[in-house]
Each structure stands twice: as C-alpha cells, then as structure tokens.
Image (spheres, rainbow, N blue to C red):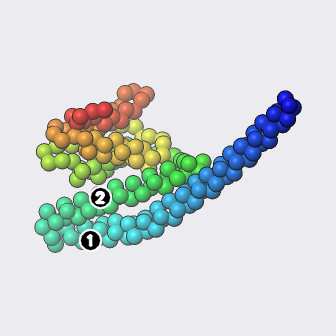
Amino acid sequence: NGLSRQAAIAIQNARLFSDAEAAQAVAERANEAKSTFLANMSHELRTPLNAIIGFTRIVQRKAKGQLPDKQVDNLGKVLSSGEHLLNLINTILDIAKIEAGRMDLTPSNFQVAPLVEASAATTQPLLKTGVKMITEIDPDLPFMHSDQDKLKQILLNLLSNAAKFTHEGSVAVRAINDGDMLTLAVSDTGIGI
C-alpha cells in the first residue's frame, strides 16, 4: 500500500514537472514573439519618424530669415518633440533587448554640456504653464566616456517625470564637476514620491 502510494506520487510529480516544462516553453515562445514584435514595430516607427525629423531640420534651416521667429521656434519644438518620441521608441527597443539578453552599450568620449542642454530643450515643451526650466552646467566639465545615448535617455526619463509631476515652480538639471566625479542631477518642486 505504501509502495503504491509512493509510485502514484512519483507519477503525479513527473506529470506536474512535464506540465511545468511545457508551460515554460510556451512562455518563452511568447516572450520571443513579443521581443520580435517590439523590434519590428520599433523599426517601422523609427523609419518615418527619422524622415520627419530630417525634413523638419531642413525646413528649420531654410526658414531662418524667411519665416517669423515664432514659426522657427515652433519648428524647433516639433523637432524636439520628434526626437523625444524617437528616444521613447528606442527605449522600447532597449527593453526588448534587455529582456532578450542582448543589450549593447556603445561607449564613446563626448562633451556633457551639449547632452544636458539638448535634454533640457527636449523637455521644455512638456513643462506646464508657469513652470521654469533651470539648467546649470559647470563651465569646466571634462569629456565623459560612456554610452551617450543611454545617458541621454536616462536624463530624458528623469526630466520627463519631473515635468509630469511639477505643476508650479521649477524643474532643474545640473551638471557639476566634483573633481574626480561628474554629477548629473535632476530636481523639481513637484509633489515628490
């Protein structure tokens, strides 16, 4: 009686293990399909968006002196928002790559000030009326060796969140040279966490 009960338990455990393996295989296939879908959609979205960004740059360049300054500024906002959307699409693709274990870093030497200024300019249209963007950049920042796109993505995410939850006051981004360390900081007068 005890032996037959143990045999029944062993058979049941074998069935459960087999079912778990099958469920895991289905989940892995679904995850691969999702990653493939995200990669394909990201590509399909990036292609026309890159064209919009490129044409906006051309029109903006040719518009100087031809259109009122307000219209040229509006083209700058379109360009900034298009670049922000492109960064969001790239974030989705990066998440898919992380989940697939294929995230690539591309380190290079670059100046930090233009990256901070571009991130602040991209976030500016997201600010609510009356909220001020503060940008403080040390004049003697060294070159940085890192993945410039990933760093910009991080700054944009922090600034976008700050803009979203700040209804009055300011959003600030600072780049400070602390000797051997570069500090990038985003702060705001919003509701906090």
**Residue at 19% from the left image edge and 61% from the top image edge:** 73
Where residue 174 appears, x then y in whole percent? Answer: 30, 36
**Residue at 25% from the left image edge and 67% from the top image edge:** 60
**112 with respect to 31 (left or right):** left
Q: CA distance from mark 2 to mark 1?
A: 16 Å
**120 with respect to 4 (left or right):** left
Where residue 107 appears, x then y in whole percent? Answer: 51, 46
| Circle 2 residue | 81
Q: Secondary structure at mark 2?
A: helix
Q: Secondary structure at mark 1?
A: helix
The quarter of the picture where residue 57 lies is bottom left
| Circle 1 residue | 59
> Residue farthest to the front?
1
Q: Which corner quadrant holds the C terminus?
A: top left
**Residue at 39% from the left image edge and 47% from the top image edge:** 152
Which numbered circle lies on residue 164?
A: none
Evaluate whether residue 63 shows in this view. yes
